[in-house]
Image: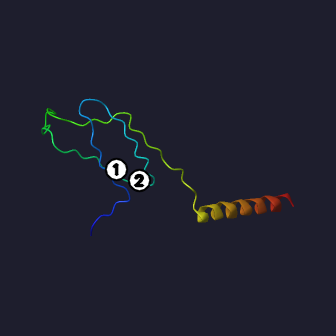
Amino acid sequence: MRKSYKYSKTVTVNTVAPTLFNFDFIGIDRLKFTSSGGTYAGVGGRGEQIALDNFTFNTTKSVPEPISVLGLLTFGALGATCALKRKR
């Protein structure tokens, strides 16, 4: 089965100076960085490398499921009913 991607972007960076990229993708659940070319860094970490700095991401706020809200309302109504019966 072939993977389908919602977003895909190829970026070519400047090897002399830092470059800022804003992707502004929404609904991402996985992110993959790959590099090509250069010299194999090897086990000791020598050779060409890629670095990411000031990498930021924003999480989305979770919205409660309707069944959760219904459960809380039911529990609250049951508690209120019990409290009223105790007062009588």
- Quadrant of residue 65 within the rendered picture: bottom right
Q: Residue at x 78, y 63 (%)?
A: 81
Look at the image and tell me in which quarter the C terminus lies: bottom right
Within the image, what quadrant is residue 50 found in? top left
Residue at 27% x, 42% y is 12
Residue at point 65% right, 64% down?
70
| Rendering coords of residue 49 (x, y %) | 20, 36
Q: Which numbered disc covers residue 28? A: 2
* Pick the front one: 84 or 66: 66
Position of residue 35 measured from the top left corner of the image (x, y, whole percent): 22, 44
In-front residue for pair 83/15: 15
Seen as rendered, the residue at the extreme right is 88
When asked about the image quadrant of residue 42, the answer is: top left
Q: Residues within 10 Å of mark 2 (few under 14, many from 20)?
A: few
Distance, label 2 to label 1, CA atoms, is 7 Å
Amino acid at the residue labelled 1 = Leu
Q: Would you call the spot at circle 1 few (<14 residues within 10 Å), some (14-19), or many (20 or more)?
A: few
**Position in image of residue 58 (x %, y %):** 47, 44
Residue 56 spot, x, y in % from top left = 42, 39
> Are the two marked residues, 2 and 1, in contact with CB atoms closer than 8 angstroms?
yes
**Residue drawn at (79%, 58%), measured in percent from left and top?**
83
Specify whether 78 is left or right of 33. right
Q: Nearer the viewer, residue 85 or 18?
A: 18
**Which residue position holds label 1?**
31
- Which residue occupies the extreme bottom position in the image? 1
Q: Which mark is residue 64?
A: none
Q: Is residue 40 above or below residue 17?
A: below
Residue type at mark 2 is: Ile
Q: How many labels were placed on the picture? A: 2
